Amino acid sequence: MIIAQFCDTYPPQLDGVGRVAAAYCVTLTGMGHQCYYVGPSSPVKNEQDFPRVLSRSIPIPKELHRVGIPFLDAKYRKQLSAIPFDLIHVHSPFISGMEAAKLSRKLSVPLVSTFHSKYYDDFMMVTHSEALSQALLKKIIKFYNMCDAVWTVNNATGEVLREYGYKGDILVMENGTNREPLSEEGEARLRGHVSLRAGVPTLLFVGQHNWKKNLHGILGACRILKEKGQNFQLVTAGDGPDFAAIVREAEDFGIRDRCTFMGFVENRAELMALYHTADLLVFPSIYDNAPMVLREAAAMGTPGLLVKDSCAAEGIADGKNGFISPGENAEDIAATILRALPDTAAVGLRASETVPVSWDSIMVKVVAEYQRIIQAYAEKRRAQA
């Protein structure tokens, strides 16, 4: 098959959604399909193991990502139009969604969309208006109603989409992760960037440094741990619009000496070494749906701490293959960390056995579903002719 994966970000400025789209491209290309990554260009030259079609882009003020301007890029449009795609898969309802829908109609091929994010929360953070956020949400649902198939990354995310007003069919297609061996190169890189104290419990956060990820809760919990006399070191990996404010809050809380803020870790081997080194991935976000970092940490034997009833916590059994905090506040997170620390090794082992699912096995399901969608689309067109 010849497939397009549309996304609003491109390496190396990737969020979780972009990493999913890239994993689709890498794995499907490895299986012998032609899977193109379609998104905004990056000023950083980087080689990828998949074909791509990139449009002109411009930076977003106060953000790490760039926004594509495909409607002003004739070269991009010409290149894209020359590819005989069998199916279009889009991972965002915004600029890439509009582009994907146009191409789907032009080529008369099916359009698949994966719902990844809590868009209403994003709208509220930007507009601070419930009325405007609801109006924008209606436009989002209109987009999903245009698609030939709609997927979500887990059941809880599907419920969010239902709450938004979508009434069509939903297929759950979970995210995967590939097990990667711990490498001497990764460990050496990590030692060169971080000086961790031996024998001290290491708490880890990996992700965008944005308050919506509940960094307040993590830092507040660390302040409580210090007050209780619990030894620990917090390491964060990632960058984001609130990075500087997060560092300042650590200083205000009197825990700066216990924290290492690494910034964006681009080297994959180093990131895997970081997961392996940590005792506990602290990820009390109620914004995220199916975080890749949880699966990656589990693959390296490190369990995650999630919040009860959050989308991210789906599939995690407290004390079995992870730890569940009863709330997202600092007190609950701190109490859960204290409860978790004695058992992180055993729970991490069970997490490694139950949480990660390989991208290869996920893509077997994806390919079968793509083929079914293509066939159903062709039959529908024949019936309408």
Image: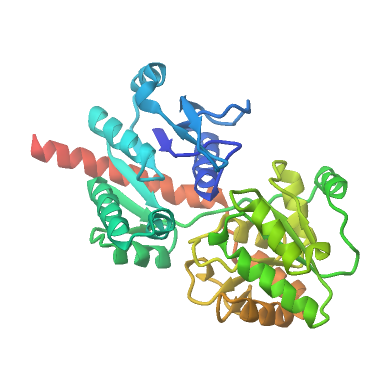
* Total marks placed: 0
| Residue at the image position 68 percent from the left and 82 percent from the top | 335
Coloration of the structure image: rainbow
25 or 201, which is in the foreground?
A: 201
Q: Would residue 319 be visible to someone looking at this image?
A: no
The residue sitting at the front extreme is 252
- Residue 82 sits in which quadrant? top left
308, above or below 88, in the image: below
Query: Whole-percent x and y of residue 68?
Result: 44, 32
Looking at the rendered image, the quarter that the N terminus falls into is top left
245 or 231, which is in the foreground?
A: 245
- Residue 87 sits in which quadrant? top left
| Residue at the image position 52 percent from the left and 39 percent from the top | 61
> Left or right: where does residue 297 sit relative to residue 292?
right
Query: Whole-percent x and y of residue 258?
Result: 81, 65
- Residue 254 sits in which quadrant? bottom right
366, above or below 324, in the image: above
82 or 41, which is in the foreground?
A: 41
Query: Whole-percent x and y of residue 332?
Result: 62, 81
| Residue at the image position 47 percent from the left and 48 percent from the top | 364
Q: Would residue 193 be visible to someone looking at this image?
A: yes
> Left or right: where does residue 107 sit relative to residue 252?
left
48 or 64, which is in the foreground?
A: 64
Looking at the rendered image, the quarter that the C terminus falls into is top left
224, above or below 369, in the image: below
The residue sitting at the right extreme is 198
| Residue at the image position 31 percent from the left and 37 percent from the top | 98
Query: Whole-percent x and y of residue 339?
Result: 71, 83
> Left or right: where does residue 306 sit relative to residue 261?
left
